[in-house]
Amino acid sequence: MAAARAAAALLVLLALAAAGGVAADGSDHRYKAGEPVPLYANKVGPFHNPSETYRYFDLPFCSPEKVREKSEALGEVLNGDRLVDAPYKLDFRVEHDSKSVCSKKLTKEDVAKFRNAVAKDYYFQMYYDDLPLWGFIGKVEKGGKADPSEWKYYLYRHIIFDILYNNDRVIEINVHTDQSALVDLTEDKEVDVEFLYSVKWKETPTPFEKRMEKYSSSSNMPHHLEVHWFSIINSCVTVLLLTGFLATILMRVLKNDFVKYAHDEEAADDQEESGWKYIHGDVFRFPKNKSLFSAALGTGTQLFALTTFIFLLALVGVFYPYNRGALFTALVVIYALTSGIAGYIATSFYCQLEGTNWVRNLLLTGCLFCGPLFLTFCFLNTVAIAYSATAALPFGTICVIVLIWTLVTFPLLVLGGIAGKNSKTEFQAPCRTTKYPREIPPLPWYRRTIPQMAMAGFLPFSAIYIELYYIFASVWGHRIYTIYSILFIVFIILLIVTAFITVALTYFQLAAEDHEWWWRSFLCGGSTGFFVYGYCLYYYYARSDMSGFMQTSFFFGYMACICYAFFLMLGMVGFRAALFFVRHIYKSIKCE
């Protein structure tokens, strides 16, 4: 108990620290004229490669003698943010016109660095009073020529800040560059550069409470909303058609089955049974690899709980635009807290399946999702270190995550497992299982596992694919996604379609006298994850401009982990729906 209390106290401290870091310094400050307002330079990187970002001063901009880094919360570090004091001084309501930041001689190496950055469309990101701002560092003039060696590369040396204020608060900031103040980087030669900046202040009636609406308005544009609502309507029609089909077909077929079986019992008890009643002595025979099955069920339940809690936080407004690191902090903290659910569900179900080695089952549950995620992280973090990118986690952050897993996730997993083992619940089977399994009759190719998975995954995927583009453009691009209510509706539709299609395929499997439905229902439910990963390939090659080994490995590596989580979560939903259905139909007939 003392260990559990210590773990809980540690997690509360971490959550408070993360929450404190999420609301960045100065976001609710009031300023007097001439008072300094914090301006932090965050990172630079290729515009089309969102994961490939570098520290601001990795490029030879004007830098102070000692670069002062801002302390960051766990979620901000996971997000790749590395905030440092910017070289510009933007005091409240103090204007500057072409003020010099510094004059410096760019060496040939510096010119080559800047030219390479301009060629890759590098942008910079800063935060001013917790408001994000972006700008490109230069431009390429192609002059209608196809040969890159004939293009001209220019660096912007004069940045102009336009700041809006209301009384004593900063409301909005925009940045643009002086197109006439350019530095030619085309040739490898030393260049003398004077970096300049200008600041202009203007009063606005916009209240402080609405200053973040600018960033979410792009996803609320009428034509975007029309597409989102079209997605909802498309998904709802899919659900209605599927539900109507299942209700009509299954109810009619089942009714006929019940009447037929009742008639058979009255007419001739010795008449040979056929269809799904024929296998009543095998349908509740426990599956092979019961420890792995239970672990997958427990992990899927935990991921479902994690997703539900994330949606609740999103719907109450925690993840407003550019609330730095809030989502990553929430994912780490909630995953740690919900590990007890995985332990309880996995171990209790494993014991219901008459499993004996519950400790091994518990360890398997703890590693089933974390293991592949950890291996993927190790590889991608090594790649990021090789690139000197901000996506590479510092050693201290890795230690914090390991501590959370060791002191919070694992103890809660064990406590949940002990509670599950001691629950003493028995598996509720309406029919007795025979001693020897019946032989499964030969089945046509389309009734085998992989074709069934393809059929099961297509319908749920078709209900969400329109919304997937906007999610991908937000996670792997620079769009902003704020319509969480629509996303939640799509998620509910996804769960319903997954449950219905799995139930339908399970019925047809049993009707073909194939009693090995346990793993099949889980695989069919989770098969949507494979379709989402297939969509990743389409998005990468057809809808995005991502390139380079680092960005490619980050995209496919982390999307593989997300799709695997989808597979486990939706597999759990599919199995639970199929189990409920199978229990219901076998309760309705007399089983000898």
Image (cartoon, helix red, strand yellow):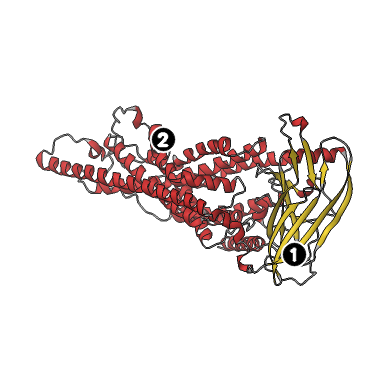
Is residue 68 shown above or below 504?
A: below
Point out the tag, 1 or 2, that comes first from the N-terminus: 1
- As drawn, the label of residue 397 is none
Q: Amino acid at mark 2?
A: Ala
x then y, percent, for residue 297: 44, 46
123 lies left or right of 346: right
Which is nearer the eye, 46 or 286? 46
Q: Quadrant of the C terminus?
A: top left
Q: CA distance from mark 1 to mark 2?
A: 59 Å
Residue 336 in view of the camera: yes
Secondary structure under the numbered disc 2 in the rendered image:
helix
Residue behind mark 1: 201
Q: Quadrant of residue 9?
A: bottom right
x then y, percent, for residue 417: 48, 52
Which is nearer the eye, 494 or 150? 150
Residue ID at (29%, 37%): 508
Work out which residue is located at the far left of the displayed protein and give it: 267
Residue behind mark 2: 454
Q: Quadrant of the N terminus?
A: bottom right
Secondary structure under the numbered disc 1 in the rendered image:
strand
Residue 368 in view of the camera: no
Q: Amino acid at mark 1?
A: Trp
